[in-house]
Structure formats: structure tokens, C-alpha cells
């Protein structure tokens, strides 16, 4: 396995852990809406970074999903649906983590965030022809 393949797998593992944390928290402590949404944003970010590593595209260390999607779209286009999903969860990267920026996602936004992370996971793994 090449160093690139190892790094891609590490990014995917980290992303899967974030998605798993979001899913388990949603099942067992649904009141932790901010935490669930944060982990969904983090999962999407890490799946995108895995894909960029796979493509050999360098990226700045940022939490900006639109920036990462723009970089990824240079090779294989992501549809507008993915940009829409990314824009809906992008704010959960930083602002939601601090008490001076009160963001209260609705139950519907929480469920949508989980679905978005799953859609990104599926699409990116297919694009990379990734299997465990």
C-alpha cells in the first residue's frame, strides 16, 4: 500500500469515527444537537480531504467545506446538491462549538446533517472505488 493510500485510509477512518459519533449520539443523547451537527460537519470535511489526497490535490488546513468542494470539483464534478448540503452544515465547524455563538439546530436539521454526511461518504467512496 502506498503512502497516499495509507493517508486516504486514515482520513476515511477519522471521518467514519465522526459519523459514528454523530449517529450514536443521535440515537442515545438526541438533545446534544450541537455536538451531532459538529461531528457531521467534521465527517464531511474529512471525507473531502481523503478525496483530495486521493486526487493528489493540495489543500490548506481549513474547515471550509465549499473551498474543499471547489478543489475536488476541478477533477470530477460534484453536483449542486453537494454544494447545497455543504453550505447547510459549514457553520457547524467552529461557531457551534463556542458559547458566544448560540446556534440551536432543529431536530430536522440534525437528521439532515447525518444524512448529508452519509451521502458525502457514499459518493466519495464510490468516486475512489474504495473498499475495506
Image (cartoon, grey):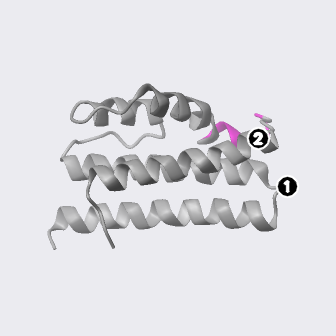
- Which image quarter is the N terminus in? bottom left
Query: Is 20 located above or below residue 103 in the figure?
Result: below
**Which residue, as the protein is rendered here, is positioned at the far right?**
31
Query: Is 91 located above or below residue 10 in the figure?
Result: above
Crowding at mark 2 (Cα within 10 Å: few <14, some 14-19, many 20+): few
Q: Which residue sits at x=80%, y=44%?
A: 107
Quarter of the image where one finds residue 96: top right
Query: Is 84 located above or below residue 37 in the figure?
Result: above
Quarter of the image where one finds residue 90: top right
Magenta stretch: includes residue 57? no
Q: Which residue sits at x=80%, y=55%?
A: 32
* Image location of residue 128, percent across then percent down: 26, 54
Crowding at mark 1 (Cα within 10 Å: few <14, some 14-19, many 20+): few
3 with respect to 122 (left or right): left
**Which residue, as the protein is rendered here, is positioned at the far left?**
2
Q: Which residue sits at x=21%, y=42%?
A: 57
Asked whether disc 1 touches disc 2, contact meaning CB atoms under 8 Å apart, the reply is: no
Which residues, given as a range, are shown in magenta? 94-101
Q: Nearer the viewer, residue 77 or 34?
A: 77
Return the mark for residue 31.
1
* Image location of residue 123, percent across then percent down: 39, 48
| Earlier sequence position, callout 1 versus callout 2 | 1
Return the mark for residue 52.
none
Residue 97 appears in the rendering: no
Query: Is 27 located above or below residue 107 in the figure?
Result: below
* Image location of residue 81, percent across then percent down: 48, 30
64 with respect to 33 (left or right): left
Magenta stretch: includes residue 96? yes
Return the mark for residue 108.
2
Amino acid at each position: 500500500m502506498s503512502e497516499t493510500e495509507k493517508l486516504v485510509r486514515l482520513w476515511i477512518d477519522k471521518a467514519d469515527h465522526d459519523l459514528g459519533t454523530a449517529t450514536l449520539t443521535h440515537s442515545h443523547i438526541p438533545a446534544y444537537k450541537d455536538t451531532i451537527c459538529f461531528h457531521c460537519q467534521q465527517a464531511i470535511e474529512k471525507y473531502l480531504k481523503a478525496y483530495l489526497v486521493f486526487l493528489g490535490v493540495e489543500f490548506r488546513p481549513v474547515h471550509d467545506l465549499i473551498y474543499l468542494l471547489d478543489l475536488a470539483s476541478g477533477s470530477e464534478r460534484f453536483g449542486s446538491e453537494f454544494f447545497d448540503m455543504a453550505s447547510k452544515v459549514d457553520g457547524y465547524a467552529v461557531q457551534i462549538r463556542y458559547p458566544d455563538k448560540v446556534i440551536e439546530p432543529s431536530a430536522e436539521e440534525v437528521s439532515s446533517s447525518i444524512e448529508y454526511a452519509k451521502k458525502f461518504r457514499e459518493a466519495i467512496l464510490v468516486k475512489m472505488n474504495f473498499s475495506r
